[in-house]
Image (cartoon, rainbow, N blue to C red):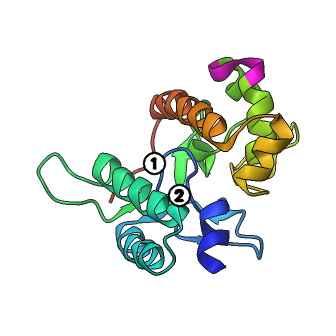
Amino acid sequence: LTLEKMAAGGMHDQIGGGFHRYAVDGRWLVPHFEKMLYDNAQLTMTYLGAWQLTKKPRFAAVARTTLDYVLREMTSPAGGFYSATDADSPTPTGHREEGWYFTWTPGEIEAIIGAEGLAVLRRVYGVTDRGNFEGRNIFYLPRPLPQSARMLGTTVTALSKRLKAYHSKLYAARAKRPPPILD
């Protein structure tokens, strides 16, 4: 249950993979946005172990996206690994703010994937106009994906394919933001 809640919550980077250091609330929604190499290494092993025991595809998928994140963002071109990604990142006005790099407004989302995409993410990731963190949105799964698919009148397979395309576009847009500092 804990692994399922962590994977569905905001401490799991729903767009870029990997896990933030910990959640600051009881719902697993709001993370401390720092990402640690050792946390992601241990969580990968834990999710793989859970997959081996349960054969739940979700656990294997979380381990895979976590490893993808480590390879893509925590691996130095010199061959070693970075130990951490800072929680703070520069905003467009230049001041550093916790979580800004990882959070979204509906307007930012719509500019990237359109109104139809925004409507899907409202249902799947709980995106609201007010936001759930300082006026911005942390993506999380407020309900299981099959339930969101039913609510959207589609299949899990079709919704997953759509989400993969949205993730790719949102990740590319996020990568253009000034990133948090790597240690």
Residue 24 position, x and y percent, is 69, 72
The crowding category of the residue bearing disc 2, from other C-alpha atoms within 10 Å (few below 14, some 14 to 19, many at least 20), is: many
Expressed as whole percent of the image width and height from the top left, the position of residue 7 reads 60, 64
Query: What element does badge 2 sit on?
Result: loop
Q: Quadrant of residue 127?
A: top right
**Tag 1 secondary structure:** loop
Image quadrant where residue 70 sits: bottom left
Q: Quadrant of residue 77?
A: top left
Task: Sort mark 1 into few (<14), some (14-19) or many (20+) by Cα contacts within 10 Å.
Answer: many
Magenta span includes 164: no
For badge 2, the amino acid type reads Ala
State the extent of the magenta-drawn residues as a range: 112-116
Front position in the image: 136 or 15: 15
Q: Which residue is mark 1?
A: 180
Q: Relative to the observer, which residue lies in front, 90 or 80?
A: 80
Q: How many marks?
A: 2
Pinpoint residue 52: horizontal percent, then vertical percent: 41, 76
> Which amino acid lies under the numbered mark 1 shown in the image of this protein?
Pro
Decide: is 165 above or below 38. above
In-front residue for pair 119/19: 119
Whether residue 103 is situated above or below residue 174 in the rendered picture: below
Task: Write the residue at 32% across / 60% down.
Answer: 183
By secondary structure, the bulk of the magenta-drawn segment is best described as helix
Per the model, the C-alpha gap separating discs 1 and 2 is 7 Å
Compare marks 1 and 2 and give the one earlier in the sequence.
2
Mark 2 lies on residue: 87
Q: Are marks 1 and 2 in contact (CB under 8 Å)?
A: yes
